[in-house]
Amino acid sequence: MHPFASTGRWSVLTHLLLLTACGGGDDGLLGSNGGVTPVTPPSTVTALSCLAPRLLAIGHVHTLTYTSTQTSTATGSAALSGTLVIATQVSGPALLDGLSTVRVENTAVSTLGGISSSTRSADYQTLVGQKVLTYRLETLDVATGIVSSLRSNTPAPALDFGLVAGSSSSQSYASTLVSAGVSGQLTSNESDTVQFIGLETLDLPAGRFVATCHFRFTSITSGIGEATDVWLAATLGLPVKKVNTRLAVGNTPGQTRTDLLSSGTVQGATLTP
């Protein structure tokens, strides 16, 4: 299942929000560029239709491929285009905080403007009722799989699929980071907000996805505001679109990236809407 913000706090959407450094886009794009057809939801609508427990089943594997675009507010900067490929596998179990969790490992290869980069990470998740909790995030060496850093959050951040459309929840927790080769640990107090916008139908390169669950995650890190919108496919539970926006601060330009699902496989079978 997957994380969340690129800071590694929202590991329920890891393969999109953690493994790409930034993102963004225009919800007004049409057709295969990710057009959105809003569905006005009654106040009783929740995101439970996008909760897919099988994504946390030991042995689960999937690979998702996205078309990517990135823009910057920097003067004279040109839009970049490329692809993002994320391979996910679930193993376990692992006992953390007295609960049985699974290890969700993600390997991502991003290409933008002809430049490629790879990342590898793993997080530990469990499903409690209608909430997915993420206890720990590991950053891995791409080649060897050796842990290079470990982030633990207390209490564990949760994604609540029972949120009613238009409502939001905020969480505060202590985040502890330990890095290989660095003595001691870095602890900080974090706060994030997640909002369930509602159900929307998307036209994407991979096809039309009806009644996707639109979540918005917002956070402020070191004075820099960031918002990430994610659309999860109904029943499948997989992220089919992500829009990430980092605001301009001082001399640091703002940046926007959009990832749109173009193809995928689940347990070796071709993904279809």
Image (cartoon, helix red, strand yellow):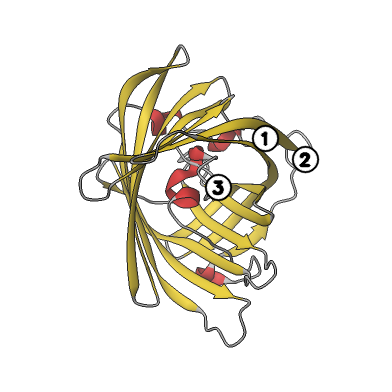
Q: Quadrant of residue 174?
A: top right
For label 3, the crowd category at 10 Å Cα-Cα, with few meaning under 14, some 14 to 19 and many 20 or more, is many
The image quarter in which residue 96 lies: top left
Q: Residue furthest right?
A: 43
Question: Distance of mark 1 from mark 2, alpha carbons?
Answer: 9 Å
Looking at marks 3 and 2 on the same chain, the residue that comes earlier in the sequence is marked by: 3
The secondary element bearing badge 1 is classed as loop
- Residue at 52%, 80% (x, y): give it: 79
Question: As drawn, is 90 to the left or to the right of 230?
Answer: left
Work out whether 31 lies above or below 87: below
Q: Which mark is residue 42?
A: 2
Q: Secondary structure beneath disc 2?
A: loop
**Disc number at residue 5?**
3
Q: Are marks 3 and 1 in contact (CB under 8 Å)?
A: no
The quadrant the N terminus occupies is: top left
Q: Residue at x 63, y 77 (%)?
A: 73
How many residues crowd mark 1 within 10 Å: few (<14), some (14–19), many (20+)?
many
**The residue positioned farthest toward the top in the image shown:** 98
Q: What residue is at 67 percent from the left and 35 percent from the top?
A: 46
In primary-sequence order, the first of circles 3 and 1 is 3
Q: Secondary structure at mark 3?
A: loop
What residue did someone put label 1 on? 46
